[in-house]
Amino acid sequence: MRDRLLGAAADLAWRRSGLVLAVALVLAGLGIALAATRLRLNANTDDLISPDRPYMQNYRRFIEECGDLEFIYLVVEHHDDPAAAKACIDDLAASLAARPELELPVVHARIEPDEQLALATHAMSDEEFTDLSLPAEAYGALWNGGGTGGLIQEARQGINRLLATGAFVSEARAKEIGAGALFLCQLLAAAGGDEAAGKALGGLGTRPEPEYLVSSTGKLYFLKILPVKDYGTLAVIERPLAVIREVMADVRGRHPAVEIGLTGKPVLQADEMATTDRDMTRSTSVAIALVALLFMLVLGGVRRPLLAVATLLVGIAWTFGLTTVAIGQLNLLSVVFTLVLVGIGIDFGVHVVMRYREARRSAAPREALRTAVLTAGRGNVTGALTSSIAFLMAILTGFRGLEELGFIAGAGLLLCLVAMTIVLPALLAMTERRQSGLEPGRPIAEEGRGPGGRLAPLAALVLTLALAPFAGRVAFDENILDLQAKGLDSVEWEHRIIEDSGAETWFGVVARDDLEAVAETVERARREPAIASVRSALDLVRPDSPERRAARARLDSVFDVSLTEIPVAWAPIDLDGLGRSLMALARRAREEAPDEAREMAGLARALVDLAARLEGEDRVAVGERLETRIAEVAAALSRMFEGMFLPLREVLPAAIRDLFASPTGRLLVTMHPRGNVWDDATMTSFVAAMRRVDPQVTGVPITHHESIRDMRGGFGRAALLALAAVVLLVALDFRRPLPALLALVPLFAGGIWLVGLMGLTGLHFNLANFFAVPILIGIGVDNGIHLVHRWRESRDEEGPLRLGATKRGVLLTSLTTAIGFGCLAFASHRGLQSLGFVMALGSLAILAASLLVLPALLARLRPR
């Protein structure tokens, strides 16, 4: 049946070549049009993972609730000069704000003073909060419009009440009245410049200094940026990243005392994409030139190679159309499907052209074309099916990125087979229909002659035995960071952060409903050695308690103060009188509370001295400073009390808010790894530790770790299933054990040699070069299938075995693959380098088995 279909295809291509080409071009144009208008690019790495995976469902729920937390990190490293780092961070933040075209939704450089004040009451201990609440009645005097005179009046009234009725009020009430009066006196004295009064107030009411985002060692300062991400392009953050680097270069010149770097997962991915794109472009250009030259040298002309390339483009266009209809998108893995079609799909055309060229030495164009389609087609059909199945098995991996790549590449190879079986013969018919006469050619060499042919199987056995022990050294390297180009700035700064304080930019996260549950989670996490640090809202706030609730109720009265716009008039004598009243209270307390009495006496003297200064020549200046200072304290305390009643998420500083609380109000606990999280063993221990804390933990470390495991497991399953399917298809094709086993010799011999050479040279499989496996399976099987089919044809030939054009076709297809992918060995991206090395080694190993070992075996086992 296969031969009948191939014969019908050859006849159709000859008789209706124009119609075939018209239909092919219309379908190709339709495919390109569909792709141009409807095929979208999805560069979101999260979408590479199958959405039904539990860990991914958990992560997506977290993203929906908490938003994107994958930040860009601008890093400033100082050399024993923190002030220089702070100045640089401020300059960076201001320079970014001055570039509105960036449209950055989030830029965090530090925790501002107002944010610290709003958080203050939540961060105090129960004792501190209670002490803060005691002068509650006095706070109202700060912003009731009475001014300094009102404060003096309020303080004196409080002291007089204690002097007049202290014995007739409860101890608690007396404590409140005294605390209020003492606070106002301390405030007045501190505002007048008294250092002791200022120390007594502590930080109460003073405006704090900004707090910067610093590593645990204090050496690295961070500025966090959340860019707008466009997943419809390969360069997801290309535009903002370019501007950010312009700003960095400008700021760097103004701050020579520090070093500035840029890293974070978005930057690492963007740099990797830029590097691979540049390497792929350069390598592809060189490879196309070398492959084209090789085509022309081997085929002895330009026209026929160009026809094969044109047909390949038709097959690629059809694949684009099918991809648009069936999937609708290309992801970061499936976008490379064209490499597969170029690497394998062109091989079908090479065999057709080679067999046609050979047949033309003894037949007219029509007969030669039919012979080429029949003879090359037998191997092409089985080879295409085996290569296709090697990719289609990726559908069973459970990893979405591989599933889509496997479907597109597998289906694309079948479409390329159709194109090379019908369209290429039609092109040959149109261009060579009028050719007459036979084409000259060199005699076809005999196979298996001489000592080399007899020794090849023995040499192959010795080589296999020698390399087999090294195969056990090959492992799977999961460290993605090691695949990046050497010297890449973002990679260097990622390593600096890890060496300085661990992977602080990596974290797993669990959500809790209240601070009590947060405390329990934090306690469990701190018992895990693989978790270096645990961060939560408890780092900033204290849990609620009866004492805190009582303090809040006491302070709530502050906001019920009736306001007046008329300041209370005052004179220095009023301040002097306040000091003397306070001195009287100190004398009364001398026996019962000597320490407090001494403090009040000192404060009374400071107030009397301040009153005297106000009577002097600098009265106006001192008075202005007094009023200004009191206004500043009033504003700071007002901000503190406003924050007291805000929801917890709103009171958290913006720079760290999203790491501690979700927009819905749930509280987050983040866990950070100990050691280099890019190392597989470290990551595995970290993930296991977090899951012991909470099985529902999520975050980038979880998706990163699990997706790599999915890819590695999927890769292994797909390879095994592909091998099983390939063996089955070869057996069905030849229907006899001996031809089937012979056809698999290049694949298995070349595969063993490849893995042995990898172990010998220290080359491991990784997430970049594992892509070589299905391609090499396709090449190895194709070579064996074509050679064994040619060997079976020799039953009708007299004399020694001659493989002729088939052998040259195998040589050409293997060399083009080795050259095409081997050019990647010179890439700067180490992942592409490893892919280039594996493909070059694998292609050459399979080629050696195909041209040296298999022909020698075939010559000795020639069918009768």
Image: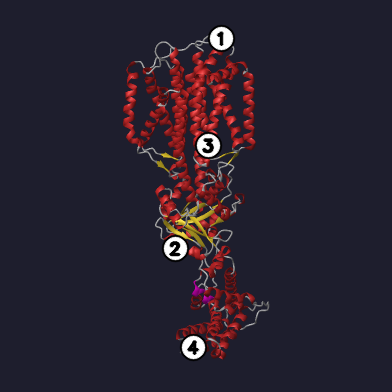
- Left or right position of 298 against 60: left
Amino acid type assigned to the residue bearing label 3 in the image = Leu
Marks 2/4: CA–CA distance: 46 Å
Whether residue 667 is visible to the viewer of this picture, yes or no, is yes
Discs 2/4, front = 2
Marks 2/1: CA–CA distance: 89 Å
The kind of secondary structure element at disc 2 is helix
Q: Position of residue 134 (x, y in %)?
A: 54, 79
Viewer-proximal residue among 624 and 212: 212
Residue positioned 45% across, 84% down in the render: 595
Amino acid type assigned to the residue bearing label 4 in the image = Ala
Amino acid type assigned to the residue bearing label 2 in the image = Glu
Give residue 681's mark.
none
Q: Please check the rendered image and state whether residue 130 is part of the magenta-colored stretch, yes or no.
A: yes
The kind of secondary structure element at disc 1 is loop
Viewer-proximal residue among 112 and 319: 319
In the image, residue 86 sits, relative to residue 205, either above or below, namely: above
Q: Position of residue 642 (x, y in %)?
A: 60, 69
Answer with the quarter of the image where residue 693 lies: bottom left
Discs 1/4, front = 1
Q: Position of residue 574 (x, y in %)?
A: 59, 85
Which residue in the rendered view is the most extreme toward the right?
565
Q: Upstream in the sequence, badge 3 or badge 2? A: 3
Crowding near pointer 2: few (<14 within 10 Å), some, many (20+)?
few
Discs 1/3, front = 3
Crowding near pointer 1: few (<14 within 10 Å), some, many (20+)?
few
- Name the residue carrying label 3: 405
Amino acid type assigned to the residue bearing label 1 in the image = Ser
Q: Are marks 1 and 3 in contact (CB under 8 Å)?
A: no
Discs 2/1, front = 2
Give residue 436's mark.
1
